[in-house]
Amino acid sequence: MRAALWMLGALVSFCLMAIGARELSGSVNTFQIMFFRSAIGLVVVVGMLLIAKKKTLLKTDRPGLHLTRNIFHFMGQYGWFLGIGLLPLAEVFALEFTVPLWTAIMASVFLGEKLSAFRVLAVILGMTGVAIIVKPGSEIFDEASLIVLGAAVGFAIAHTATKSLSLTDHPMTILFYMCLIQLPMGLGLSLTGWQVPGMEQWFWIVVIGLTALSAHFCTTMAMKWADATVVVTLDFLRLPVIAVAGVLLYQEQFEISLILGGLIMLFGNLLNMQRSRRSDPAVRP
């Protein structure tokens, strides 16, 4: 029950962040949105660490890996925000579900993890789901889908780096350096197209900054109370919820292929996770 409540918080956070990004699309520079997201996140994280008197978590012995992680995470985040303004919300969320599959490939290449037959099958299922969603070769295929898939690859590389960092650094340390490193990146790239946000735009900027943190926090807490496979399954509910939001708020067309493709990718992700747990008895949610 607790896991379900935490995942409800994550679901609301992810959906609000996507709606905020759609509301700001075309009116505020994407890099500027990312700068403000990092600035708000940095204030919140540092404030929490100071209140908890855990200033030691501001230090790390692996600054290079943090930098690498955040370069790719920044690229992934940019592609995600860009995709939100170009594609139906549900399609962006569906393509985002390929991240665990790309992560399995990246972990095999960079961390030496074995790419077993089950993981290969999971990747094949994931790519099948993608093909159903983007319909390559058809007249409705949108090249913007490639941007979101590229973003998913960026997130996967970042997740692989996070997996390595989690062995030595606290999650709050990883969040701190994410905000600290990405803040000047967003600022530098937004200067040429800087715009002064209006009151409504500031509202959505704050929503994005807060939900970006709450989404990850709620997901992490859910992992404490339930098996990872349960969390991933509950996380899939983001797809139909954001599809309904797209229909109601932006008159987007509901595509059953999104749900079908997403379900196939979900099955591939669960297969990959179950096989990982069996091959490593030490793995815990």
Image (cartoon, rainbow, N blue to C red):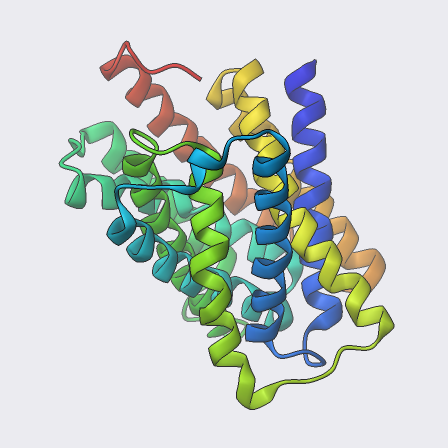
Residue 40 placement, left or right of 188: right
Expressed as whole percent of the image width and height from the top left, the position of residue 141 reads 50, 71
Q: In what quadrant of the picture does the C terminus appear?
A: top left
Q: Residue at x 68, y 56 (%)?
A: 208
Query: Compared to 135, does 217 lie above or below?
Result: above
The answer to whether any part of residue 156 appears in the image is yes
Expressed as whole percent of the image width and height from the top left, the position of residue 93 reads 57, 51
Furthest residue in direction bottom, as rendered: 192
Furthest residue in direction top, as rendered: 281
Please state which of residues 114 and 195 is positioned toward the viewer in this rendering: 195
Expressed as whole percent of the image width and height from the top left, the position of residue 37 reads 61, 60
Q: Residue at x 47, y 57 (%)?
A: 180
The answer to whether any part of residue 253 appears in the image is no
Q: Based on the displayed image, in which of its 4 quarters is residue 274 positioned? A: top left
Q: Based on the displayed image, in which of its 4 quarters is residue 269 positioned? A: top left
Expressed as whole percent of the image width and height from the top left, the position of residue 194 reads 62, 85
Q: Residue at x 59, y 88 (%)?
A: 193
Q: In what quadrant of the picture does the N terminus appear?
A: top right
Query: Compared to 150, does 117 lie above or below?
Result: above
Counting labels gives 0
Q: Residue at x 64, y 56 (%)?
A: 40
Query: Compared to 249, does 9 lie above or below?
Result: above
Please state which of residues 199 and 250 is positioned toward the viewer in this rendering: 199
Please state which of residues 212 and 58 is positioned toward the viewer in this rendering: 58
Q: Based on the displayed image, in which of its 4 quarters is residue 38 positioned? A: bottom right
Please state which of residues 121 and 185 is positioned toward the viewer in this rendering: 185
